[in-house]
Amino acid sequence: MTFYNTIDENFDELEKSLAKAKTQELKIMNCFYFCKKPLSPSMVLSLSKLNCPITSIRRAMTNLSNDGLLEKTNDYVEGLYGKQEHLWCLPKKPEVYIQSTIL
């Protein structure tokens, strides 16, 4: 789920909020594809130029991680507010081993 309707929006408002959250997720994924390196939520906010709270970035990154599109690492950097933030990255592709047979 891209947007959590905790404020009981009506159908029209909810539709707009869902579309906005989906756009945020696409912009976030573009940051990772463009940079090709691990990023923190603060780094994504800066790179994406999204006009939203950092909590929206964190929500989107968590959703993307739950969907298998991002991975949260065990590495940290200092965030916007001087606190440590996890770095996130694109998932590593599983290595495929091809077994050859000799005829």
Image (spheres, helix red, strand yellow):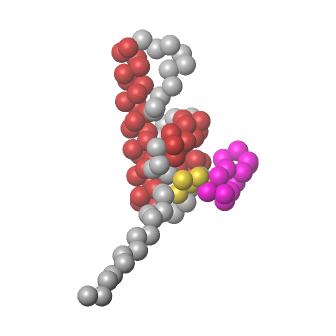
Residue 16 in view of the camera: yes
Extreme residue toward the left, this view: 103
Residue in front for this viewpoint, 91 or 89: 91
Dividing the image into 4 quarters, which one contains the C terminus? Answer: bottom left
Residue 94, percent from left and from top: 45, 65
Extreme residue toward the bottom, this view: 102
Q: Position of residue 61 (x, y in %)?
A: 52, 44
Decide whether the magenta segment is chiefly helix, strand or loop: strand
User: Whole-percent x and y of residue 91?
Assistant: 48, 58
Find residue 100 and report its horizontal and vertical position in percent: 33, 81
With 12 as the anchor, is 72 left or right in this view?
Answer: right
Query: What residue sits 48% from the left and 63% below the top?
Result: 92
Magenta range is: 73-86
Would residue 26 be counted in the magenta stretch?
no
Please name whichever residue, 43 or 15, is drawn nearer the observer in this view of the structure.
15
Nearer the observer, 63 or 37: 63
